[in-house]
Image (tube, grey):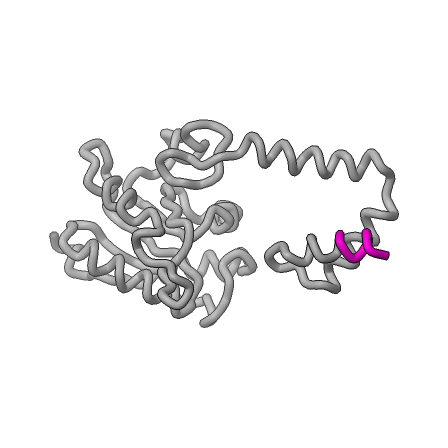
Amino acid sequence: MKSFEAAVDRLSRLPGIGKKSARRIVFHLLSIADDQVEELTDAIITAKSQLGYCKQCYGLSETELCKICSNSQRNPDQLCVVASPETILKIENTGKFNGRYHVLRGLISPLDGIGPQQLTISQLINRLTTPNETIQEVIFAFNPTNEGEVTINYLRQRLRDYPIKLSQLGYGLPVGSDLEYTDRMTLNKAFENRIKLNPEAENS
């Protein structure tokens, strides 16, 4: 069954989907009506063609500015820095954060050849120095991994001369966990107990 195995192989290349899950998905797709399969493929093709990246935060958007960046009701004083757009969706589901976001498009990982130049760090700093911005606190919301820690340490050094509070998500996130799979309650606690990284900024 070459066609079956080819479908399984393609699906198993997607993040978070192993061979066993890929087989279950293929069996399911084979069991449903053709029009349902077409609806799925059409939705994926439409998303691929219409979704792009917000020119300000680099999150997913169908317009030049995403709904969050263009929403005047969001708190302009807080900026949550994340590694990927998926984390924005997860945080938004908690209803805990009402600020804005900046997507780095990854984390610093020397072993994988990913340095600061491959991320949107220079764009982040430009946002902090733009005259019409009123950012007072930057919250780092990264997975508690070595790459997350390396990225936070680098950003702390780059931002140390700016009169801005720096913090990171606090207790509640176990080491090695993935924010995209963290439950709402745990994320709420992580925001409530976020750790101050430059307490001296409180007095500046």
| Residue 6 sits in quarter | bottom right
Q: Is residue 2 one of those drawn in magenta?
A: yes
Taking the spot 28% from the left edge, 42% from the top edge, the residue there is: 77
Q: Is residue 145 left or right of residue 75?
A: right
Residue 195 appears in the rendering: yes
Taking the spot 35% from the left edge, 56% from the top edge, the residue there is: 140
Residue 98 appears at what percent x and percent y?
40, 42
Q: Is residue 9 one of those drawn in magenta?
A: no
Residue 15 appears at what percent x and percent y?
59, 57
Q: Is residue 189 left or right of residue 119?
A: right
How many marks on residues?
Answer: 0
Vertical order, 187 against 59 (above or below): below
Vertical order, 197 against 11 (above or below): below
Residue 108 appears at what percent x and percent y?
36, 60
| Residue 169 sits in quarter | bottom left
Overall secondary structure of the magenta section? helix
179 or 32: nearer the eye?
32
Taking the spot 27% from the left edge, 64% from the top edge, the residue there is: 153
9 or 35: nearer the eye?
9
Residue 191 appears at what percent x and percent y?
40, 57
Taking the spot 20% from the left edge, 50% from the top edge, the residue there is: 164
Q: Start and end of the magenta stretch? A: 1-7
Residue extending farthest bottom: 175
164 or 2: nearer the eye?
2
